[in-house]
Amino acid sequence: MRDFNIPGRSAAMAANGMAATSHPMATLAALDVLRAGGNAADAAIAAVAMQCVVEPQSTGVGGDCFVLYSRGGGVPVALNGSGRAPYKATAEWYAARGIRDIEVQTPHAVTVPGAVDAWCVFNRAYGTRPLAELLEPAARAAEEGYVVTPRVAYDWQRNQAKLRDPVTAALFLPGGKPPAAGDRMRNPALAATLRRIGREGRAGFYEGPVRRDILNRLKSLGGLHEAEDFAAQHAEWVEPIHAPYRGCEVYECPPNGQGLAALMILRQLEGFALGDDSLTEADRLHLLAEATKSAYRVRDEAIADPAQTDVDVENYLSNGWAERARGLIRLDRVLPGNEWHGGTLHADTVYLCTVDRDGNACSFINSLFSSFGSGIVAPESGVLLQNRGSAFRTIPGHPNAIAPGKRPFHTIIPAMLVKDGQAVMPFGIMGGQYQAVGHAHFVHRMLDRGLDPQQAAEAPRIFAFRGKLQVERALPEVLVVDLARRGHDIDRRVVPIGGCQAIWIDRRRGVLMGGSDPRKDGLALGY
């Protein structure tokens, strides 16, 4: 039980259904669906559509998504809704033009948006409500206006320089400046697009006027996209990957996402007695940081689209790999930091989870990648486009080199914890490059330290990245000093690291326990 004298929030408790998102309007949209008899899949779609309106810096219909879904509480299935590079895009094309990195605010960073197709596939497979019904609350918010919440306003203000293109500014900088918390914003063009998708399904986005608007905008900026690229985009059901930790199995989507790195970190940590009080909290944070380095070396050099590159998942999750990596770690000193090719460091995403009265559980993530994605807006449809292509390499022969129809390495990852063959917790931690570390740290805090989902979401975070140890300001100074003494190069962060949602399913008692990160505006709520 938490100390009620210390500021914080109790975990949400309910019996029949629950949603946890990073925005109040999205949580309410999901809960409305659940209370009306919809299932976890229905609620997740309604929530994410709402977030595409009210958290435009973090997600949108111009982005990608991944889903893990447990039907009736069983082992989850996985849906890969990531977009593909245009068929004219080759590493050689970029190399010949001296383009070493694909810059965020260019049409070359825009892969074909995969989210809408994935929503439609998911709705057909597991939904019980018409898509139009699920998208209508979001369309209404876009048409009538919504109140900007504090964290959204903070992110908007921090990234306003990215929105100065006249087409983008007309939508996202009303009066030439970002909205403040409490201001009302509208996007009537996006409302019409959402209703078109509701009526026409996939064709409402990948064909007709919406596609034409997006293509015209990208081509005017020098993009390589064609109508055929949109026609070829499709989500795929894939086999999730998993690894053991403390008597549970942690499930992740397979590559091209970084869920593999999360499992590699946990495989290393499982060999340490992290629940034992003989280790200090500084010891535990140090071990997490060191385990990150081996996993992220593999992540950056090997994880790519498995349709075009072999990724040896079995080897990387093996006992042998974990033992070798673990053997390099020492409690009193640090391993060398990883190199990193560049791309996008700061990223915004939305992660949400839902559980319904029948025990169905959904873990859902949707993103534009960078804050406000590429910064490129298709004006007639109100669609802001992602910059996932900036994660590609332009080195011919590299596993993650850009290629026709290829999906880039992806940072966004939903997760689910399974025990004795039953799903016990959909969870996710948004935050760009940090997400794999966030998954491992969250699972450790719950299974090793006995925290509830809300406590684990609130706890201070660290991230070993690019030779430095990022630490949040909430981390006690005595721990920061201890970590520095071991050789960590401390990077004190101003912007919080990531954001978390989770719902624990206590099947024996018939209780749901939810947590939502205070670093964002949202909440977990059940009935």
Image: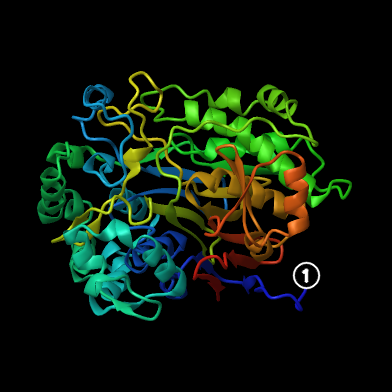
Q: Is residue 167 left or right of residue 390?
A: left
* Residue 362 on image: x %, y %: 49, 56
Q: Residue at x 26, y 23 (%)?
A: 95
Mark yes or no: residue 27 visible. no
User: SS of the residue at dot 1?
Assistant: loop
Three-letter residue code for mark 1: Met
View extreme (right): residue: 278
Where does the C terminus fall, quadrant-wise? bottom right
Image coordinates of residue 294 in percent, x first then y, are 62, 30
Which residue is tagged 1? 1
Which residue is at a point 73% across and 40% down the rendered structure image? 287
Q: Is residue 206 left or right of residue 341?
A: left
Give the colour scheme of this rendering: rainbow
Please tell me which residue is depicted at 53% across the width and 55% down the height of the picture: 498
Residue at 27% across, 54% down = 375
> Closer to the camera, 413 or 397?
397
